[in-house]
Image: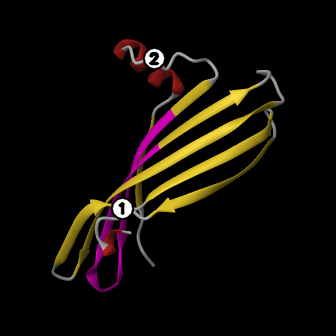
Amino acid sequence: MSNLQRIDRLLTVKEIKANARNARIGFGRPDRAVFFSVREEYRNLINGASNNRRVLRMDAVVLKGERVGGRTGYLLRTDVQIITTHLGSETHTGLGDIYAQVLYIPYLSRKFAFVTGTGIVLPTATHKLLD
């Protein structure tokens, strides 16, 4: 069994909007929330091998409808991984596979959400040990 260490830093919508206003890049649309997180994952593999991943995740939520209940919308997610794998005397660092996901939210209220969607893994790894 591998050990997993995880470090998350999730920016709030308020922080992102404040940064955008300061940088004047314009996340000013009230119907769109944007989230960004960076996390690190470490795995001890068999025979002394190890795997370290930095996962950059970007989420965008697009909602329509009333604020109180009955909202609909989409969640768009992209994960980009930068991976370092140590196996024996070899160490490889590079881009891992990219994951993209689209979720449709036909109903969203304060107490309930119905969500359906799909995801795809794009084989962008720069080495066979990095996927």
Residue 39 on image: x %, y %: 40, 49
- Residue count near mark 1 (Cα–Cα under 10 Å), binned few <14, some 14–19, many ≥20: many
Distance from disc 1 to disc 2, alpha carbons, whole Å, reads 30 Å
Is 71 displayed left or right of 40 in the figure?
right
Q: Is residue 72 above or below residue 47?
A: above
Q: Position of residue 77 (x, y in %)?
A: 54, 45
Q: Residue at x 35, y 65 (%)?
A: 125
Label ID, residue 51 = none
State the extent of the magenta-drawn residues as a range. Answer: 35-57
Quadrant in which residue 48 is drawn: bottom left
Q: Say if the magenta span includes residue 40.
A: yes
Q: Residue at x 80, y 22 (%)?
A: 68
Horizontal and vertical percent position of residue 79: 46, 51
Give the vertical position of 93 relative to 22 (above or below). Answer: below
Q: Residue 66: x, y in percent?
A: 80, 21
Q: Which residue is mark 2?
A: 26
Label 1: which residue?
A: 96
> Does residue 43 show up magenta in the picture?
yes
Query: Which residue type does callout 1 highlight?
Result: Gly
Residue farthest to the left, as pictured: 89
Q: Secondary structure at mark 2?
A: loop
- Give the quarter of the figure containing the N terminus: bottom left
Circle 1/circle 2 CB separation < 8 Å: no
What amino acid is labelled 2 in the image?
Answer: Gly
Q: In terms of sequence position, does the residue under pointer 1 or pointer 2 come before the other?
A: 2
